[in-house]
Amino acid sequence: MVLLGPEQVESFHRHGYVLVGPLLSIEQVETLRNSLDELWDGWAESLGVSREDYCRVVSQWTNVWESHAAFARQLRDPRLAAMAAALIGCQAVRLFHDHVISKPPQHSHTIPWHQDYPYWPLSAPRAVSLWLALDDADVESGCMHFMPGAHREGERPAVDFLSNTTDWGERLRDQVAVPVPAGWGIFHHCLSWHTTPPNRSSRPRRAYITIFMDAACTYSPSHSEWHPMNKRVRVAPGEIFNEDCFPLLGGRGCIP
């Protein structure tokens, strides 16, 4: 397991993202792939459709840690929580939610430029996502692209994914594609600007994302009134997410 050095932390704060790895062995990656196949088979069967048809229509699954023990074990790796806490600059981190995103071969579209934080009901932009590749992700298969340093310009209004008008103009020349080998991951700031192109390859492109938030973050539904996790929250606005569905995952000083 690779842990973060000072140079990586500094690069994260400068660019808004950092590639780290390997985080998982090939055997661990295969376990998560097989577990995802089990979930897909079950969900497709419950709808009376084939897995191929199901995955052609559905591309994102949230809170998979509650559906399969393999993902629950993965997100509770204390070393990942320690890295997230170091990047956020806090003592402990809590799970906001996890999700799987899939871009099937030749069947996906562009995810437009956006920041994550405008969609989240959190009191402050003190959160990072770990985008963990379950397949080799390259430019052809739709790897992540970032606008380095744009996170330091602050929050902008949420993007309409169906009619995105974000125009970076000449700054598009600055975008950086970040290929990620299977078992490696990208930590990125919740204000980082990122996009993914279609998967034009003949290979799947699956990723498991864990969103870590500062354990001191409080619930702010007015910041994002429609987020699906709002239905799970039982604390009052302004209170810490002290609930079972937002578990504490560890922090600095918790590395075995």
Image: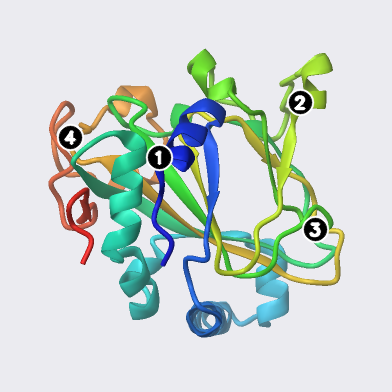
- Tell me how the rendering is colored: rainbow
Q: Residues within 10 Å of mark 1 (few under 14, many from 20)?
A: few
From the image, state whether disc 2 or disc 3 is nearer to you: 2
Q: Can you say which quadrant of the picture contains the C terminus?
A: bottom left
Q: Are marks 1 and 2 in contact (CB under 8 Å)?
A: no
| Image height of 154 relative to 220, above or below | above
From the image, state whether disc 4 or disc 1 is nearer to you: 1
Q: Earlier in the sequence, mark 4 or mark 1?
A: 1
Q: Earlier in the sequence, mark 2 or mark 4?
A: 2
Q: Which amino acid type is marked by label 2?
A: Asp
Q: Residue at x 14, y 39 (%)?
A: 235
Q: Which amino acid type is marked by label 1?
A: Pro
Q: Which amino acid type is marked by label 4?
A: Ala
Q: CA distance from mark 4 to mark 1?
A: 24 Å
Q: Position of residue 232 (x, y in %)?
A: 26, 49
Q: Is label 3 in a helix, a strand or a loop?
A: loop
Q: Residue at x 85, y 63 (%)?
A: 106
Q: Residue at x 37, y 74 (%)?
A: 67
The residue identified by callout 4 is 216
Q: Position of residue 115 (x, y in %)?
A: 55, 30
The residue identified by callout 2 is 174
The residue identified by callout 3 is 199
Drawn side of residue 122 relative to residue 22, left or right: left
Q: Position of residue 223 (x, y in %)?
A: 36, 23
Q: Are marks 2 and 3 in contact (CB under 8 Å)?
A: no
